[in-house]
Structures are given as structure tokens and as C-alpha cells.
Amino acid sequence: MIPQSFVQELLSRVDIVDVIERFIPLKKSGANYFACCPFHGEKSASFSVSPSKQFYHCFGCGVHGSALGFLMEYSGLGFVDAVKELAGQVGLQVPDDGRSANPQDDTSERLHEVMGLAARFYREQLKPSRRAIDYLKRRGLSGEIAARFGLGYAPDEWQALQKIFPDYQAKTLADAGLVIDNDQGRRYDRFRDRIVFPIHDRRGRIIAFGGRILDKGEPKYLNSPETPLFEKGRELYGLYLAQKPIRDEGCAIVVEGYMDVVALAQFGISNAVATLGTATTPQHVHTLLRQTDRIVFCFDGDAAGRRAAWRALENALESLRDDATLAFLFLPAEHDPDSFVRAEGTEAFRKAAGNAKPLARFLIEELRGHHDMDAAEGRAAFVHEAAPLVTRIAAPLLRLQVIKSVAEESGLTQAEVEHAFGIIAASPKHARPRAPQPETALAGAPRPAFKGRQQQVGTRSGTRPFGRRKPPSTAGTLLRLVMQHPTWAARMPVDLVPSDSPEGLALIAIIDLLSLGEPVPAGGLGALIERFRDTPHGETLSRVAAELVDAEFDESIVETLFEDSLRKLHADSLAAEIASLLRHDREHGLDPSGRHRLAELLLEKRELANASKVSDL
């Protein structure tokens, strides 16, 4: 386990601008640096890097974090590997406090080593095999593309891997999915007489294999089983090589087979990936939406292809964003992506992908095709079938558009469809009037004097509501101030901070940190959120830090704002205790000690109000 003190020292020694500039060019504008976001396709520079806060944030897709967070997001590194890489850049040796040596790390390292050795063996077996070479040539693959994807050949032998693994009975080989133990206790290679496709993680490490039979037989494709390294519902074939092309093209193309990915790459379409013998999962969609804001699912035009497309649609609904597009390309019945690009060419495929059918249109057309829309019963069934799908759409504006389309198709009003879907929209005449905004520090939460953008930017998986943010609570204001001035946490009475909100709980955690004698994180916002990574407060602090990256308190009044907020916190606490005593007096009466306490609180409240008036002069 890496000591937290080392993580904080590391972040104080690195500059986030230097770290990120190793991967993408940054241009200075004002106090910050900007670039086109590397995590989603865009033409304007909305990716901001703050050297003063040591924090990055994209105003387009919402991704944000520290220097460590960037390495993890961009390079697909785990936390420990990101720390090691960052430490190596500044010449620091990563210590281990020895408290929780994780045997899983050693196991994974051994499995990665075994998979790498197997991949090299399979590659070495390809060239001497005339049958394998002839098969690849018949499929139109060049030697260059085979080398790029690391294709190999598993010999037609029961125990070929014994040539490189003398301890053929080792448990690691079974754990890696390279061998099978039958009921009689006999062990043999999983992949035999197959073209082998290495499957990489986002760091380029081999985690599994896919094998394609050379002649006729079943199964045509064989994948590695689930292992500690490989979970097929989360991985995509070709993503490691496709990451940069996806960003450059602003689009990811999802196909169904290894050969489709390889063939498209040979024709210059390098932004394609494939699922691994499973339907498209929500994790697949989420992974790709972290890379781009446009995904095109490419399926055969037959019934099986449409069923696969429908499963992809269903699994994507809860990951949709209003700033992202998912579309579906159905090829002619006689083609798959491999044959289509060879017959029609690169530009024809690109044009077809550009004209792919958007998800909302596909959803409506597919549902409409199931029912007799000329009959009332058919239209009712259409709305009934649409309800559980439409209500799962996570993107609010897209969901609204689809609701309108359902209304138009069914002959109902939008309100009637919303009612049928269980979405009850309040009528304006019944809307609750907005409470007036308090004008004094004691009457309500002080208004933070923010400078910067006024539009709230949501998290990457969410959307960006229009208009001004709702003013933060008193605890929220104090949290924002303390995140920019961490030493001020020592001036705060922890017993007065309300624990009924995530921001209040995060503020209490920072106060407790200082009270225990831990040093204040010295690496800006980035170091602070890394200190609370993987804690219940990490998400709250990360969200607030993203709001602060391009908006900060006016330093000329920040001290006054802090004192006003503390007084408001004190006043709220007094008011809550007074209300509790008065309620008890009405219901049960107060004993002498209770009446004495009430008198003390009322006097304290009056003195606090007078002190506030003096401070306002």
C-alpha cells in the first residue's frame, strides 16, 4: 500500500501542466491552459488546466481530476501504476508502508507475464504455418496489418504450450485461461489450430485471446474464459489501438467480429472496436462515451443483426447524454463490415457510417413496426411498449424529444403520454412559488462572490442544466472556501457543521483531518481530492473542485464571507436548538434547567445578531 504522505509529496513535486503536456498540446489563456478535450471529440478548446489549483476540467464533457487522475483516465492506468509512473517522471522511489501487501497484485503480474509469453509463442508459430498464412491471404490481410494487431497461430497440437511452459501443470496457466483440465484430470491447450487474436487492455497489456478456426467447424470463434484479468462484458477488442483514432475521428464504430476490426483498419478505418462474443453492455457504452461523443453500431442487415442492435439500444439507454449521439448502421443483407469495405471501399463505408440512423429514430421505427398504428389498440400497445424504454433514457432533453415523437405517432398529446409513462409534470398554475432570496448574512446563506463561468457543468455521465447554479448552502459555501484555503478548517467549530448533506460531511472530514495533525495538502485542489480518493467524500470534493476550476471567490471579500458564513452557521445551530426547546415546552413543558437553557440561547442569539450588525457597518 502506498502511504498517503507519499502521494501528497508527489503531487506537491509535479506540475499538472507538465504532466498533461506530455500527451496533448496546451495553450495558455489567462491564468489557465486550454486544449481540445482528449476524452471526447470537439473542435473548440473546452479542456482547462489550472496550474494554481493543480486540477483539470473539461467544460464540454465534465471530466476532471488531478495529475494522477489524468494519467489514470488517459492511459488506462490503475492508481498504483499511475503513482509509479508519475513518481518515475520526477525521480522519486515509491515506498510501501507494508500495512496491506496485496497478493492480488503479484497474481496479476504473473498472469500478465504468462499471457505475454503465450502471445509471443503464437506470433512465432504464424510464419511457419502455410495453412494459417494462406487463410489470412484469402481474407485479404496484409503482413503489416497482421503484425500491427499481433496476430498469431495456435498449432494443431494438444499441448503445444508445453514448449514454452516446462511446468505445464502450473496453476497460473489455468488461471490465465490458456489450458483446460478435463474430468479425467488431463490438461490440454485451449487454443488449437486457430488464428489467434490477442486482446489488450487500455494499457496495451494482453489479457485474453480470441481464436478463429481455419476451416469449417464449431465454434467458429473461441474466446478466453473469464479470468482475473479478463471480463468480456467490459472489454472491447481493438480499443487499445483505436483510442487515438477514435479521438481524432470524433467517432467510435462498434462491430461484431475481430476480422471486421482488422479489415477496417487495413482500409484506413482505425476507429473500430468489437464486442467479445457478447451483446453490447452498458459498460461498453460507458467506456466508449469516455472516449468520444459519437458511437456508430454497425450490424448486418438481417434479423440477427437487428436483434443485436436492439440489445445494444436497450443497454445504452441509461448511459445516454444530451451531448452525445448513438447511431445504428445496417449493412446490406449480403455484407458484413469486412466484405462491405472490400467491395465498396473506404469512402463508401465512411459515408454509410456518417448517415447511420440515430438511436431515437431507430427506437421509434422499431416499436412502430411491431404494431398496427391504424388501430387504437395498436397505438395503445405502441405507447405501452415504449414506456419502460423511454423512461430509462438518461439524457433529459433526448428523453423529452422521444416523448414528443411517441405522442405524435400515437395521436396523443405530450401531457397524455407523460401521464401514461408515470411522468407527472406540475402545471405552471400549481407550481410552488419561489422563496425570496435572503439579503443579510444571518437571514440566509451568504451569496458567494464567484468570478467566472455561471453555467453549471455536470459530471461526464450527466448533463449540463442551463442557467445559474442554485446558491450553495452555508456548509457548501464554507466547503468551497476551505477547499481553496485548507488551513481555515482549523478555525471552524466542527460541532456546528450540519451533517445532513454530502457537503457538510465532506467539510467535517477536512476539519477532522487537520485536528488529527495531518498536514494540509499542498498540491492545490488536485492534492485535496486525491487525499480523499476512495472515501465517501471523494465524489463530493471532486464535484465541487470542478465547479471551482474556472470560478473562484473574490479574494477582496473572501475573509468577510468566511466570517459571515461562520456566524450564519452559529445562528442556524442556535435557531435549531431554540425551536426544539420551544416545541418541547408546547408539548410537555420545560423543567427549570430547560427554561434556563432557553433563556441562554435567546440571549446568545440576540448578542450574535448585534455583533453581525456591528460587522456590517
Image (cartoon, rainbow, N blue to C red):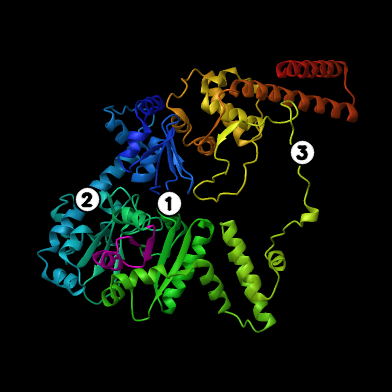
Tags 2 and 3 in contact by the CB under 8 Å rule? Answer: no
Q: What residue type is labelled 2?
A: Gly
Q: Relative to 419, is 564 above or below?
A: above
Tell me, for residue 410, which label it has, or none. none
Residue holding disc 2 = 116
Q: Using a 10 Å C-alpha cutoff, classify the residue at mark 2 as few (fewer than 14 neighbours), some (14 to 19) or many (20 or more).
A: some
User: From mark 3 to mark 1, how far is it between C-alphas?
Assistant: 40 Å
Q: Secondary structure beneath disc 1?
A: loop
For the question of whether residue 152 can be seen, the reply is no
At horizontal 45% and vertical 66% (from top left) the residue drawn is: 327
Residue 263: in magenta span: yes
Sequence-first disc among 2 and 3 = 2
Q: Is 391 rendered above or below residue 303?
A: above
Reading the image, the residue beneath label 1 is 290
On the image, the x and y values in percent for residue 306 come to 45, 74
Give the quarter of the figure containing the N terminus.
Answer: top left
State the quadrant of the C terminus. Answer: top right
Tag of residue 436: 3
